[in-house]
Image: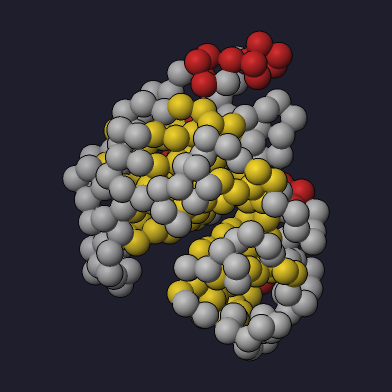
Amino acid sequence: RGALSAVSFGDEKHAYVVGSGGVILASNDGGATWRPQNSGSKDQLLGVYALNSRQAYAVGAFGTVLATSDGGASWQKQQLSWEKLIPDILKASGPLEPNLNAVQFISEKLGWIVGEFGLVLQTRDGGETWSAQSYGENLPQFFAVVFRDEQTGWAVGQLGTVVRTVDGGKHWARVAVETDRNLDGISIDGDRGVIVGDGVVLASDDGGVHWKKLASAPEGRWLAGVVMASREATVVGQAGTIQALDLGDNDLKAKTEAR
């Protein structure tokens, strides 16, 4: 079996998992059972976001963007014009289709995708058209994106890169953090947030303006994902790592040790 890259729940019952070879698995019973779906793609899928029980998006290698509006019964590949989206990179490097690593929607119309070359794409029409908000030939690639509302969002990626926007992505500003390691996941709940990556956990309690490195991160282990709600967060990663964090304390200490 191929590797599975990402999972997203649209509600308590409906969820999707994506992975290598264009694999998409769907569940309508809260993850108790999973059934394969026809994605129409053989490219590796790296990110998925389910907005509700019927609308979901998957992204992946070679600029792949897939969308469903019928609960996964059918998936349509969205065509992106890279000549219009990243003309400067194509002029310098020749034809290419950048890997797309993560996707998030905050409404049926408004969503973002991030990927190689510091790429941030935005749609305001449910994915029918996309515009590039940020990209550059030598920029680190982004591995995760999260928006708290229509204006405030973050993207994280290579070499400790964290960027933040407060105007819906019109402008992105670099956020200083205490690491230069790759960052793979981010979760925001209110004013609290957690970022995880290559042996590092960063936490914020001021709306993602400042981030503090947690000494409790499993040493030498790659952390791939994080989910949080209120003051509780769970990080997962390499070698079966599962770590629960209590972010209620002022010093943001870990609640439990890695298993």
Q: Is residue 215 above or below residue 10?
A: below
Image location (x, y in percent) of residue 257: 67, 86
The image quarter in which residue 242 lies: bottom right
Residue 23 in view (yes/no): no
Image location (x, y in percent) of residue 229: 45, 74
Q: Is residue 252 above or below residue 168?
A: below
Image location (x, y in percent) of residue 8: 39, 58
Q: Is residue 74 above or below residue 222?
A: above
Residue drawn 69% across the image and 64% down it: 211
How many labels were placed on the picture?
0
Q: Is residue 2 above or below residue 225?
A: above
Residue drawn 64% across the image and 59% down it: 209
- For residue 97, side relative to residue 196 (left or right): left
Q: Nearer the viewer, residue 2 or 93?
A: 93
- For residue 29, side relative to residue 217 (left or right): left
Residue drawn 60% across the image and 49% down it: 164
Residue 141 in view (yes/no): yes
Q: Nearer the viewer, residue 134 or 72?
A: 134
Q: Nearer the viewer, residue 118 or 45?
A: 118
The image quarter in which residue 252 lies: bottom right
Q: Quadrant location of the C terminus?
A: bottom right
The colour mode here is: secondary structure
Q: Nearer the viewer, residue 118 or 205?
A: 205
Residue drawn 30% across the image and 59% down it: 10
The image quarter in which residue 215 lies: bottom right
Image location (x, y in percent) of residue 167: 50, 42
